[in-house]
Image (spheres, helix red, strand yellow):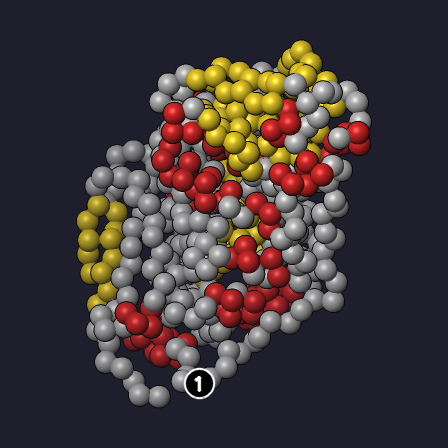
Amino acid sequence: MKIPIISTKMAVVVPVQASPARVSFPTRIAPPNGFESRWKGAVCARSIQTKRKMAVPLRLSLFHFLALLVLLPQPGARWLGASRTAAAAAARIGPLPTAALRRLYDTSNYGRLHLNNGLALAPQMGWNSWNFFACDINETVIRETADALVSTGLADLGYNYVNIDDCWSYVKRGDKDQLLPDPKTFPSGIKSLADYVHGKGLKLGIYSDAGAFTCQVRPGSLRHENDDAALFASWGVDYLKYDNCYNLGIKPEERYPPMRDALNSTGRKIFYSLCEWGQDDPALWAGKVGNSWRTTDDIEDTWKSMTDIADKNNKWASYAGPGGWNDPDMLEVGNGGMTFAEYRAHFSIWALMKAPLLIGCDVRNMTSETKEILSNKEVIQVNQDSLGVQGRRILSQGEGGCGEVWAGPLSGKRLAVTLWNRCSETVNITMTLADVGLDGSSAYSVRDLWKHETLSAAVGTFGAQVDVHDIKMYIFTPDVSLSAI
């Protein structure tokens, strides 16, 4: 292979110490000059959480340079480690009981998984370090977060994954080409940390990348899948978030299955979370690869980002189900960029969409309002319902269609319904029961999940006044069998 001439300088945006408690992080790491064509799609866009930042040059070491040359595919070469299908497939979602429900809540695209790892029968719940801490992580933060999940009662509600995101690893591999924890921030090693987390009754997650490097230029796992998976398993890791930076322009359908096979071969059950940013429509293919797949770019702690991402994720509702879930990214609840009402809407819609509920704030120091939202057991039960059908937008009304009804079937012939006000003023949102697939002539008991009270029975129509950017969430339970519909 002809060796290209590559500049060894890379432009990186590096944060200055910010005044807010929340840590800022780089927005873009550019490919080396003259290398753009091979790095198509390889840049990871990270949201900016502070106004103060500065750019400084970062030089690629000779190690990084040679690693790139090795990882670049040879012309005409076939990808090593092609997908192997598992013997058993996950059970499909059973048919919904009525024609009206089947029409509104299509599950026909729900695929058969090849992971055969028995995980993700409900969307994953836990905590991830990135949204608040970015690269400013260390083993003390992880240990204290595990402690806080237990002491606040969040662990008892199902938040059991403690996931370390980027920046845990050293900047280059070891003498045996193995990944190494950063000795300054994780001096005790990942195995010791996993033992601590497991001792709390929780599970430990870790991060790597289906590319040459991670988004923060630590070693990636591309073409190191078997060794890295075996290492993660030996440490006692329970969860892998697998990112998409520095992917050398190789299609994700080729880059992600080798890690699936490597994880399977370890004999340890490791949740496999694909973070492909939705660029190649992973809902169309990732059900055969991972337990969840990102359908969107990174979330930001803003109303616009959250609502835009909800809309994008809604498109893929028919593809999700037990064993494999659409992932519109982690929760921003408690990070300060939205109002209480907006965070309540954020949490409600994520729960209804059967999205992963991965807390993204500092749970060691969360406010009572943040805890109130994250610990709403009735809303969490919607997310974790055994039927496993993703809720979706059913209708829009009012000026600009900003008054929305979202709904999704639950087990026991129940239906979760949200009235979501995306308008700039208080509005009345109404619906007929037939709009959401229920029998308009039958009576239904209605449970308000945020007020925690049962309302008068609904017949024919239902509605409520909803404040600006707020949401109402209900469960409708039939007083008569839905079989008559």
Q: Identify which amino acid the numbered label 1 is placed on.
A: Gly
Q: Is residue 187 visible?
A: no
Instruction: List the residue tagged with mark 1.
Output: 76
Helix or strand or loop: what does disc 1 sit on? loop
| Residue at the top extreme of this rendering | 456
Can residue 471 be seen here? The reply is: yes
Image point (26%, 34%), residue name:
19
Q: Nearer the viewer, residue 194 or 2?
A: 2
Of the 4 image quadrants, the one containing the N terminus is bottom left
Which percent across, then down, holds residue 327? 52, 47
On-image quarter of the C terminus = top right
Q: Residue at x 37, y 49 (%)?
A: 135
Return the x and y of residue 11 as percentages of the image width and height: 22, 60
Q: Position of residue 252 (x, y in %)?
A: 48, 65
Please, is residue 292 above or below residue 2 in the view? above
Q: Is residue 15 left or right of residue 210?
A: left
Looking at this view, name the residue that lies furthest to the bottom.
Answer: 1
Indicate whether 172 appears above or below 291.
below
Image height check: is 176 above or below 131? below
Locate residue 157, reporting x and y percent: 63, 32
- Residue 160: image quadrant is top right
Front residue of this view, candidates 94 and 286: 94
Badge 1 local density, few (<14 within 10 Å), some, or many (20+)?
Answer: few
